């Protein structure tokens, strides 16, 4: 099984390369000239896209082909007070340049809209803002010229006192989304509310691919072992929505998230790096029936954690554990 590792948004190795430079709404409102303030936001966005391209080049140079883009590429883009502002026309060249680089090097990129994007909500105004946020993320991917294989990963959302009803409300709201938004979504189990089996059931009901977070599953489960769910989770990646725009004859590999608990007293928070043993145990369990998988590392050290994990993988490979290192960010794992 070929395993590719990726990381989230920021580099702790490349300095002065933040793709998330921003401005608060309070600072924006202090500027008397609104048009000049909007130009400042656009310049911040240009800098973010420039740094994103720098990170992409760093990734390719390190054999990293799985990467999560920051949602903060355009500061204040979805703020209710700026709904008359459309920055995409002036940023078209910068977005296109990032997208061309992604496509040229066959990278897998995604977004993870924040926790305020919830389709399980009973509140109409929250649903409207959630859909607006999903549309914004989709607009950014479209501006990059990326096909539907570039996804927006979200959680089901809150339970609001009745988890089965909330799950059904998610399904209803999802089915009412425009097809272009539906095709971009993946769904992930969370660490407090919706377990992996519950998330899987929703994915099966609406045809969504499921991103299994094995750390979340460890702290929020129904007694199941993660590899017991894997055959059904892997099947969700063969759905029409999962494979939309995938070239004929190819199969888009499933993706999982991995992180390690910060401490026994704080098991939900993420540690700086990734403990390899639980991850390798899971990967070996699924290797026989999984040709390829992409692993998003959600550790505090970002790409530094990826490089640390690869050093651990090299040590395991040298010890003859059925692991072979393919390049700077990929391994092959035997069952």
Image (tube, helix red, strand yellow):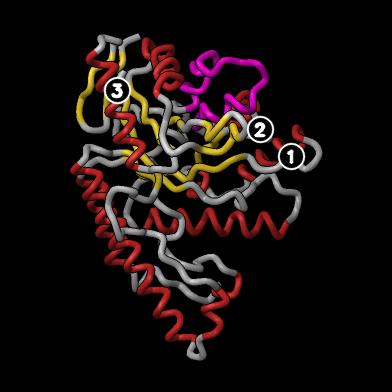
Circle 1 crowding by C-alpha within 10 Å: few under 14, some 14–19, many from 20? some
Region rendered in magenta: 211-236
Nearer the camera: disc 3 or disc 1: 3
Residue at 65 percent across and 46 percent down: it is 119
| Residue with the most extreme bottom position | 32
Dividing the picture into quarters, in which one does residue 309 lie?
A: top left
Element assignment for label 3: helix
Looking at the image, is 158 positioned above or below residue 278?
below
Considering the whole magenta stretch, tell me its main secondary structure. helix
Residue at 55 percent across and 35 percent down: it is 188
The front one of 281 and 106 is 281
Mark 2 lies on residue: 194
- Residue 173 lies in the magenta stretch: no
Asked whether the residues under the numbered discs 2 and 1 touch, taking CB atoms below 8 Å apart as contact, a structural biologist would say yes
| Mark earlier in primary sequence (2, 1) | 1
The front one of 303 and 207 is 303
Looking at the image, is 208 positioned above or below residue 177?
above
Circle 3 crowding by C-alpha within 10 Å: few under 14, some 14–19, many from 20? many
Looking at the image, is 136 positioned above or below residue 243?
below
Image quarter of the N terminus:
top left
Dividing the picture into quarters, in which one does residue 310 lie?
A: top left
The front one of 214 and 121 is 214
x then y, percent, for residue 294: 36, 30
Mark 3 lies on residue: 313
Mark 1 lies on residue: 159
């Amino acid at each position: 099984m070929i395993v590719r590792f990726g990381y989230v948004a920021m580099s702790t190795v490349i300095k002065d390369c933040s793709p998330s430079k921003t401005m608060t709404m309070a600072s924006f409102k202090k500027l008397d000239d609104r048009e000049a303030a909007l130009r400042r936001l656009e310049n911040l966005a240009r800098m973010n896209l420039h740094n994103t391209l720098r990170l992409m080049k760093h990734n390719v140079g390190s054999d990293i082909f799985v990467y999560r883009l920051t949602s903060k590429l355009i500061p204040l883009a979805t703020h209710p007070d700026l709904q008359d502002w459309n920055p995409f026309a002036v940023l078209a060249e910068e977005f296109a340049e990032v997208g061309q680089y992604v496509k040229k090097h066959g990278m897998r990129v995604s977004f993870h809209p924040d926790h305020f994007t919830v389709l399980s909500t009973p509140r109409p105004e929250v649903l409207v803002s959630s859909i607006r946020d999903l549309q914004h993320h989709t607009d950014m991917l479209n501006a990059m010229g990326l096909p539907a294989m570039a996804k927006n990963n979200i959680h089901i959302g809150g339970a609001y006192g009745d988890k089965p009803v909330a799950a059904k409300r998610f399904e209803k709201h999802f089915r009412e989304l425009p097809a272009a938004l539906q095709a971009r979504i993946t769904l992930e189990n969370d660490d407090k509310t919706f377990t992996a089996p519950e998330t899987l059931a929703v994915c099966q009901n609406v045809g969504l691919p499921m991103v299994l977070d094995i750390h979340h599953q460890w702290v929020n489960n129904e007694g199941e072992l993660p590899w017991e769910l894997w055959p059904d989770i892997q099947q969700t990646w063969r759905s029409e929505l999962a494979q939309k725009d995938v070239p004929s004859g190819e199969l888009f590999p499933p993706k999982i998230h991995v992180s390690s608990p910060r401490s026994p007293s704080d098991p939900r928070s993420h540690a700086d790096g990734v403990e390899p043993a639980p991850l390798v145990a899971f990967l070996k369990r699924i290797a026989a029936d999984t040709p390829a998988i992409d692993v998003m590392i959600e550790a505090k050290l970002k790409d530094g954690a990826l490089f640390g994990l690869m050093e651990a993988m090299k040590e395991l490979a040298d010890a003859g554990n059925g692991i072979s290192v393919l390049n700077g960010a990929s391994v092959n794992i035997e069952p």
